[in-house]
Image (tube, grey):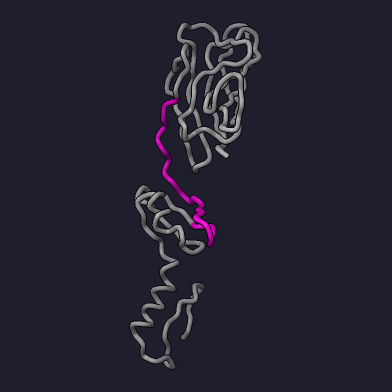
Amino acid sequence: MATFGYAGIRVPEGADAPVGPGALAELALDVDPHLVQHVTDAADRDAQYAAAPLHTLVSAEDGSLWIKTSAETNTWATISEPLSAWRPISLKSGFETLGTVGVRRTEGVRVHLKGRLQHTDGTFINDPNCSNVGSVPPDCIPVDLGTWVGGCSLGGDTINAAGRFEVLGSNTSSAYGVAGDILWWYQGPGGTAWVDLAGSYWMD
């Protein structure tokens, strides 16, 4: 039986016996791994295609597209996915938002934050060690410590335009909070009127 194309699809030729149903079945089996399979979501993908061959493409109803990267395990790489909506963070007592504040997880392993926080009583944020300002949702808690540089107000006596944000990971131990808490570290004199959460960290 002759084969055609890069996929090596089997097609009967003159010397082959006329076995139509069998030849069509073989053609379908050859073509099937190269089709884009359709599912409802990632859970449906895992339920239907965990044992699918390497390079299987699966698309979900929301536009997500994955390719299987293992012939032996249920491992997928994300080619495309729609951005999730911004979600609120939980604020600690004494803090309030200054405009829109939110958290968003993308690509499965990247978490982004945005927005500014300030004290509810208008005083400067000036704790002696660090300030525990809030916490991220449970599905945004990293394995290890997540860190980034955050901006802040330059009003008052301070001369520093930035500080350090941390999100405590599930493998992190701290005297200043628990896994998922957002800590602000700052060494500017006099503290700062507000802090800007804009930044991101890896889940893994």
- Report which quarter residue 45 is drawn in: bottom left
Residue 72 belongs to magenta span: yes
89 or 143, nearer to the observer: 143
Which image quadrant for residue 189? Answer: top right
Q: Position of 62 compared to 126: left or right?
A: left
The foreground one among 6 and 174 is 174
Q: Residue at x 46, y 77 (%)?
A: 9
| Total count of labels | 0
Q: Main secondary structure of the magenta part?
A: loop
What percent of the width, then of the height, locates residue 93?
Answer: 46, 13
Residue 56 image point, x, y percent: 46, 61
Residue 199 part of the magenta segment? no
Query: Which residue is depicted at the point 43% across and 59% down?
Result: 49
The relative height of residue 158 versus residue 15 in the rendered view (above or below) is above
- Residue 161 position, x and y percent, is 61, 18
Quadrant where the C terminus is found in the figure: top right
Asked if 66 appears above or below 140 in the picture, the reply is below
**Residue depicted at 48% across the width and 40% down the height:** 106
How far across and down, in percent of the image, does residue 126 sit? 59, 10
Is 25 situated above or below 106?
below
Residue range corresponding to the magenta coloring: 68-89
